[in-house]
Every structure is written in C-alpha cells, then in structure tokens.
Image (cartoon, rainbow, N blue to C red):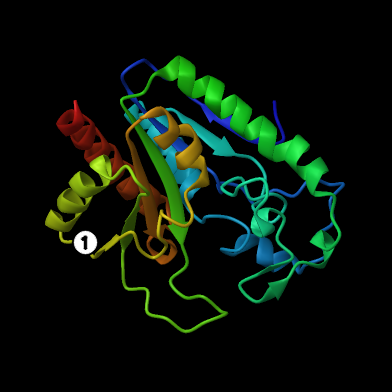
Amino acid sequence: MSEAFRQLGMPAPGGIVCVVDHASNDVPHDIDLRIPAHLLGEHIAVDIGTAEIAEILSRDHAIPAHIAAVSRLVCDLNREETAPGLVPEASDGHPIPGNVGADREARLDRFHRPYHTALAQWLDKAEPALILSLHSFTPRLAAREEERPWQIGVLYNQDDRAAHIAIRMLTAEGLNVGDNLPYSGRDLNYTMNRHAEAHGRPYLGIEIRQDLAQTSADHARWALRLADVAQRVALELA
C-alpha cells in the first residue's frame, strides 16, 4: 500500500491503461490544511467522478488504472517539482493556510516522487498502446466569471495524434467538445509530458465536466463511452 497511489487491475502489453492524477481527496492525518471540511468535497481538492469512472474502467472494461491516493491540496501530482502550485497556498480563491511554509521537499519525497516512480515502472511493464489520462473540471470557477459550456475536453501538448481522432469521434456523438479546453495541455500536462510524450507513447487527455459525473449512472455511462472511444482511437493509431 502507498499513501500516494493505488493501482487497479493488471495491464497487458499492447492494451489501454488509465492514469488519474487527481482521483482522491484524502488528507493524511498528520497534515492539517486548516480549511473547512466541505472544501474537500469540491473541485479544488479532487477531480470529482474520476476515481469512480476509473474503477469501472478497470473492473468492467479491462482498462487498468494508476490513480492518486492523496488530494491535490496536499501535493498536486500533475505539476513539475518546481511549480508554485505543487503545494498550493490558495486554490480558486480559497486560502490553504496549512500549506503556507510547508516543507515542499518532504511532500515531494512522500507523495510526488513515489507516485511518478511507480507510474514509470508500471508503464514500462505495461507497454500500452494508449494511455487514457482522466481529469474532470468544474462548470464554474469561483475566482473568475467565464463560460464553460464544454461537456468534455480533450487535452494535448505536442503529441496530438490521439487527441484529434478522439475530438472527431466525440463530436460525432453530439457532444460539445473542448479542443485543448477548458485548459490547454500545452500549459498543464506534466504527467503526460513526462510519461507519454517523453517516451513517444500515444495518450488521450480527457476532462469531463463535473456536473455530468455526479451519480453512479453518470460514472457508468462515461466509463462505457471512454472505453469505446479509447479502443477505437487505439485501433486507428495502430
């Protein structure tokens, strides 16, 4: 067992795997963020719905998953080691007083480095045909007014092979698809930059709008859709 990650299912060479950097809102008992408890259920602490979707992908669709086991408020696993937001002192307008003056190196050694070391080893063994990087986004940020109409976003940096295929497929299903929206993978893509792009591994970066991923029925629908799209993308890339 690790404080930093969980692994679900057993990957097979040439298959599809799922990586979920913000799957948990867990805060270890010896870390006090000094925030209201309700914030741990909101988007600043966890990518809502992603853990449940990943569990269904692993259990029902033969897509194993490597997922975070600690909240992004403790250590953001999808950030470079030097990034200011790695141990956030504020998020979407909410101060995180317990992170002010926190020992970044200790958080890196305890969470960030074990997560990424284990992921590197897992992917080396898996030799996947496609990595599905799963995130979710809030319909509305508290810190600024902006329209976020997309039901799903597809993110990418330099390697856009899988992204453009998936955007076409998801649009054909009638979805409002964000092309590198609501965030750009050219700005926020650390895990896939390190473990996919740096190794030439195709990946599909997905952001699901959180109001569409609330219930168990929502989770099952998204898992089915993502499994289907990922499999068809992998076939086109082969």
Q: Which residue is mark 1?
A: 175
Which residue is rendered at x = 43% and y = 27% of the image?
64
Q: Quadrant of the N terminus?
A: top right
The amino acid sitting under disc 1 is Leu
Q: Quadrant of residue 196?
A: top left
Relative image position of residue 91 (x, y in whole percent): 65, 68
Left or right of 73, for residue 17: left
Residue 10 in sight:
no
Give whichever of 77, 12 is nearer the camera: 77
Left or right of 97, for residue 231: left
Relative image position of residue 208 (x, y in whole percent): 38, 57
Residue 74, above or below 150: above
Circle 1 residues within 10 Å: few <14, some 14–19, many ≥20:
some
Residue 107, above or below 140: above
Which residue is rendered at x = 61% and y = 47% of the image?
80
Relative image position of residue 46 (x, y in whole percent): 58, 55
Q: Quadrant of the C terminus?
A: top left
